[in-house]
Image (cartoon, rainbow, N blue to C red):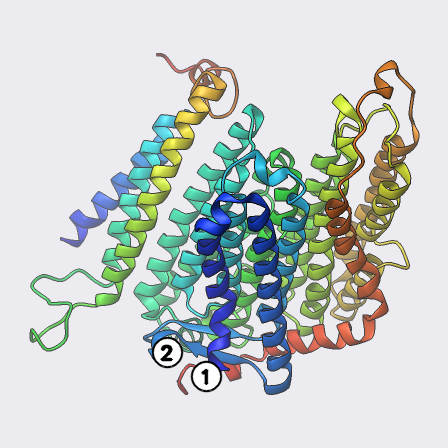
Amino acid sequence: MELLYSICVGVLVACGVFLILRARSFPIVLGLTMLSYAVNLFLFASGRLSINHAAILGTNEQYADPLPQALVLTAIVIGFAMTAFSVILSIRARADLGNDYVNSEQKPSARIGVKK
Amino acid sequence: MQHLVAFPVLFPLLSALLLLLPPCGKNMKIRRWASSLFALISFAISIVLLTNVLENGPATYAIGNWQAPFGIVLTADLLSLTLTSLASFLSFCCILYSSAGDDEKGNFFHPLVHFLLMGVSGAFLTGDIFNLFVFFEVLLIASYSLLMHAGDKRNTRAALHYVIINLVGSAIFLISLGTLYGVIGSLNMQDMAVRITQLSGDDIQIAKIGGSLILIVFALKAALLPLHLWLPNTYSTAMPVIAALFAIMTKVGIYSIMRVYNLLFAADSGPLAALGQDWLWYAALATIAVGTFGVLASQNMRKLIANLVVVSAGTLIALVSLQQAAATAAAIYYLIHSTLVCAALFLVIDLVSNQRGKLADRITTGRPVKQGLVLGFGFFIAALTVIGMPPLSGFVGKIWILKSTYELGEYQLFWPVYLVSSLLLLVAVTRAGSIVFWQNKQTEADKSEFKPAHISKLVSTYLLIAASPLLVIFAKPMTEFCQQAAMQLHNVSWMTQAAGGL
């Protein structure tokens, strides 16, 4: 389970970083979303992975650490707000600048020589 | 009285909400008065707390009476209260300045300033590292909106960069928190400081990774090379009054490094002692150098000041990375001085550029500044301060920094970098000032509209500038105060006791 879990987190981070480096605002928003999913999963795992353990004392023989769950909840809420803001900002940037390139007027793929 | 510790956080929240409600929400005049008043009250609260802590020693406050390490605590020592006072004073000046009309150029200026103040004060006061993250986000989302205030196209791109880099920073912050929590098992900073000494085996390596990540995040906020690239653009495209307000935000990063360095990576904290110290030291020196080149290369005044902010951040981090109370005391003095003077410069330059027509703040020969004497005098004082010429506060700070690094034996590299940088700053700033104020040519369009600077703008600018002579006149009590604050920061035993005798 740990292996599968860490591979998931790793793949999500890799996708997120790749998308952020695309230097176009909408892929970046998607990348940031993926990154925040990965972060949420990672935070959750910091309390160790366990099955059938309640997060409340006294309901079960064995219990899970409740703190990471509270942290994830906070991180989700904050991440959601930030994603909403970055979506709005990207739409505004698209309208103001006439394109969705983050760094310059030039198309990013033309600069680094990637095929369409 | 004990509940007062929470007020620097709660009061700005309350005032921001009140400013959205009917009497203040509709009527601009009432809103301005109320907003200034609230900022003054926040300042008063911080000062009252500060005098209280001076008399009775540092205080901790368990929110909801949930005891540490399980609950979230606020810790109020001299350093954090100095910084909250500084932040509320700065926001008072900026609110006063914006009341001359800048606040009407967009929506919700006043509530957002108070939310920003809440986030900043919270970050300074909190004793819980996850709570620090939450307050970072509070101040960031307020700053995102303020950055877009009265924005144009140029502004949008800078805001996009700023938002994206900070969102990535937040993700890294969370990863580092998860890593640290995974091995240490606590998020209360004092508790972490104790538990970190008990780590063994592979856990040490994992904790080092977490600690390095958290330093990267703070370095990003503090604008340390190579993570400083966002700062000049952001600060020079934001509205000047907002850039002035942002002068406190890099200081949040520096404060966090100070705090973390003295609790988690303190010299006696076992396996993680002085984590990344060399990196910070050399990166800070490089930041001073690169910031200085930025100042030299700046084509307009706002960018020049933004680069001065980078130089001051580099200086501060160099001092912090020495991890000695003597250097920290100098850093605290320099921090107060540099925040106020950079904010003052942003405001002065805004006043100047309003009177130069299309040239705005570009460093070129143009029409004369209308109120050359009033504004020129302000610029002169602020520029002397920021360069560190006698007899103003910059000079005291500079001498103190040189002295403390000499005594700590770290002068071989620091002195040349810092002194050459000061010389180059002197050249760049005097050149810029003399071109803007003295090299004039009369043109046809000159006779057109002339609006003298609004009185509240002048008052708020001079309030900030006046801090510099005051810091010199009261240099002795200030010096003793900074030393006391630094001692308190370095001597963490009171904190661990406060965390429940762990």
Image quadrant assignment for residue B445: top right
Residue A35 placement (x, y as % from top left) = 32, 41
SS at mark 1?
Answer: helix
Task: Report crowding for label 2: few under 14, some 14 to 19, many 20 or more residues within 10 A (C-alpha).
Answer: many
| Along the viewing direction, whichever of B296 and B482 lies nearer the viewer | B482
Whether residue A116 is visible here, answered yes or no, is yes
Answer with mark 2 or mark 1, whichever residue precedes in sequence: 2
**Mark on residue B72?**
none
The residue at the point 76 percent across, 72 percent down is B478
Type of amino acid under label 2: Ala
| Along the viewing direction, whichever of B270 and B51 lies nearer the viewer | B51
Whether residue A23 is visible here, answered yes or no, is no
Q: CA distance from mark 2 to mark 1?
A: 8 Å
**Mark on residue B68?**
2
The residue at the point 75 percent across, 65 percent down is B405
Q: Is residue B388 above or below residue B354?
A: below
The quarter of the rendered structure image containing the C terminus of chain B is: bottom left
Task: Report crowding for label 1: few under 14, some 14 to 19, many 20 or more residues within 10 A (C-alpha).
Answer: many
Residue A20 placement (x, y as % from top left) = 39, 32
The residue at the point 21 percent across, 43 percent down is A8
Q: Is residue B82 above or below residue B142?
A: below
Q: Are marks 2 and 1 on the same chain?
A: yes
- Residue of label 1: B498
SS at mark 2?
Answer: loop
Q: Determine contact: label 2, label 1, CB under 8 Å.
A: yes
Residue A30 placement (x, y as % from top left) = 31, 32
Type of amino acid under label 1: Ala
